[in-house]
Amino acid sequence: MTIKTSTFTRITLAVYGEVVTLALPPAMQPPAPSPMPTSAARPLPAHLDPAHLSDPSSIARGLWDSLGPPCSNVSLLHVLRLMFALTARNEDWDIDGYPEYFADLSPIDTRGDADEWIEEIMERLRIPVWDQEDPRTVQDFGESVRRALSGDLARVRYSYATHFVMFVAKQGPEFARDVLVS
């Protein structure tokens, strides 16, 4: 069954199947036009109108938190990063505990090929960093990355360096500042 709603002046319909009767219906006339019912526009209540809120995301956060576990176990920011910035791969959904899964910020082993460790960093940062990550952990991670890049930047391909900065930026401005700025 298909339902179409619009203003039609003519409709052509093809029906397939067995003929039931040969009698043709009398000529049909379109119905007389009638005015559409009108409704008065009512403004949203102030507590639901994002334009009047000091924190417009509070509505979305409240709806997200009302879903309960497992949704409420991760922040709205985490979900938004997964949806719009750090798109999950299909195989990520097979990771135990996903989407309650966060980036590993343990120190990076920068011995060996620069392309390998920069790929390791990018792989870690394609998953959101925990919103309540200890600032000291983020600073230590940033220091190890800056130290590695300062000595081996000449060995890192420019495309990798660009992707690295992109992945860091997707984690948010505070994280990017802590990792990229000395």
Image (tube, rainbow, N blue to C red):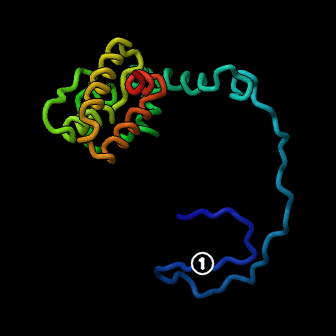
Residue positioned 58% across, 88% down in the render: 22
Position of 108 compared to 163: left or right?
left
Asked whether residue 103 appears in the rendered view, the answer is: no
Nearer-the-camera pick, 181 or 11: 181
Which picture quadrant has residue 168?
top left
Position of 142 compared to 173: left or right?
left
What percent of the width, then of the height, locates residue 55?
A: 64, 21
What percent of the width, then of the height, locates residue 150?
A: 30, 30
Which picture quadrant has residue 98?
top left
Position of 35 compared to 161: left or right?
right
Position of 35 compared to 8: left or right?
right
Label 1: element kind: loop
Q: Is residue 158 above or below residue 99?
A: below
Nearer-the-camera pick, 10 or 55: 55
Nearer-the-camera pick, 103 or 148: 148
Residue positioned 47% across, 22% down in the render: 174
Asked whether residue 32 appears in the rendered view, the answer is: yes
- Kindly identify which residue carries mark 1: 13
What percent of the width, then of the height, locates residue 49?
A: 71, 28
What percent of the width, then of the height, locates residue 172?
A: 46, 28
Q: What kind of residue is marked 1?
A: Leu
**Count of marks, rendered view:** 1
Which picture quadrant has residue 145?
top left
Residue positioned 43% across, 34% down in the render: 170
Q: Is residue 155 above or below residue 100?
A: below
Q: Is residue 22 above or below residue 48?
A: below
Nearer-the-camera pick, 108 or 60: 108
